[in-house]
Amino acid sequence: MSVGWTYDDIFLKHLTGPEHPESPERLRTITAALRQAGLLARLQDISFEPARPEDVCGIHDEAYVELLRLACEHGMTFIGSSETCICPRSYEVAMAAAGAVLAACDAVMAGRVRRAFCAVRPPGHHALRDCAGGFCLLNNVAIAADHLLRRHGLRRVAIVDFDAHHGNGTQQAFEEHGGVLYISLHQHPWCGFPHTGYAGETGRGKGAGLIVNIPLPPGSDEAAYMEALEKQALGRLQQFAPEFLLLSAGFDASHLESLARMNLKPESFGKLTAILAAAADQHCRGRIVSVLEGGYHLSSLGRSAAAHVRALMDGH
């Protein structure tokens, strides 16, 4: 079975302005890097439809989703915070991105592909239940986890988030849930945003113990990430025994990034992915959907994404 991917030029229509780091050029760079590495031709394209409001309202308040639609329709230039820019087509693009991730999950569950990489934007893991933020409008990976639980009847879904910034929106979505294990490896002290992700934030109620924050100091390199995975993350995955693994694949822990201060090289993301792919083989029949989050230094982003996709392929 091949590795699938979701991409469409509609994701380039979310326009954030000429100086904004979360730009359409990110996806052009990733596509070019995958093509140059000979990987693009090996990926199986997964067709998709835009998500519907009912698809995303398991994670987001209906009123917020409608507010996002109206804000775009009426020409507002940002929502939630000034750095979270929007344009008239941003609602349409965000719903397409969410729909692409849902289609990838469906393809994996149906056995058409074993794994998938979703080259989508805008990113999602900072989007809260009722508020946008941190460049994020809809929480794609959280919407996917909710879909797997509700529509496919799974009982245990794990999310591993290796973006340099903590996924505060994803944590909020599942900190009292009980069916989702959320593991985040991120820079701490913070890289400017979102000021959450302490190790002591571990979930509440049914979700107690299912939020696993692994703060890493600025300058952490490949060895530090590998140690964190092996000594903290993998044991929690084994205890939880997920039926499906979702990845919040942020590549902004690169040593070249200006929005964080970590020290990973492009090949580091491949090694990290290979470890997680092996864990998926052990616990959930290899089923992985990886969803693009951050990564803003373009040359590093392209090479890192290519290393990530190659590892998804090599492990399948």
Image: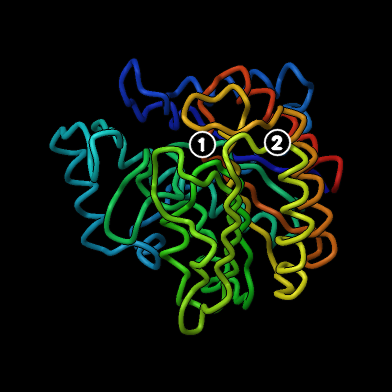
Quadrant in which residue 272 is drawn: top right
Q: Farthest residue to the bottom: give it.
A: 205
Residue carrying label 2: 221
Residue occupying the point 74% across, 37% down: 222
Looking at the picture, tell me which residue is in the foreground, 294 or 24.
Answer: 294
Mark 1 Cα shell of 10 Å, populated few (<14), some (14-19), many (≥20): many
Residue occupying the point 54% across, 50% down: 101
Residue occupying the point 59% across, 64% down: 212
The residues tagged by marks 1 and 2 sit, at their Cα atoms, a distance apart of 18 Å
Mark 2 Cα shell of 10 Å, populated few (<14), some (14-19), many (≥20): some
Tell me the SS state at disc 2: loop
Residue 177, disc: none
Residue carrying label 1: 294
Q: Amino acid at mark 1?
A: Gly
Q: Is residue 273 left or right of residue 181?
A: right
Q: Farthest residue to the left: give it.
A: 74
Tell me the SS state at disc 1: loop
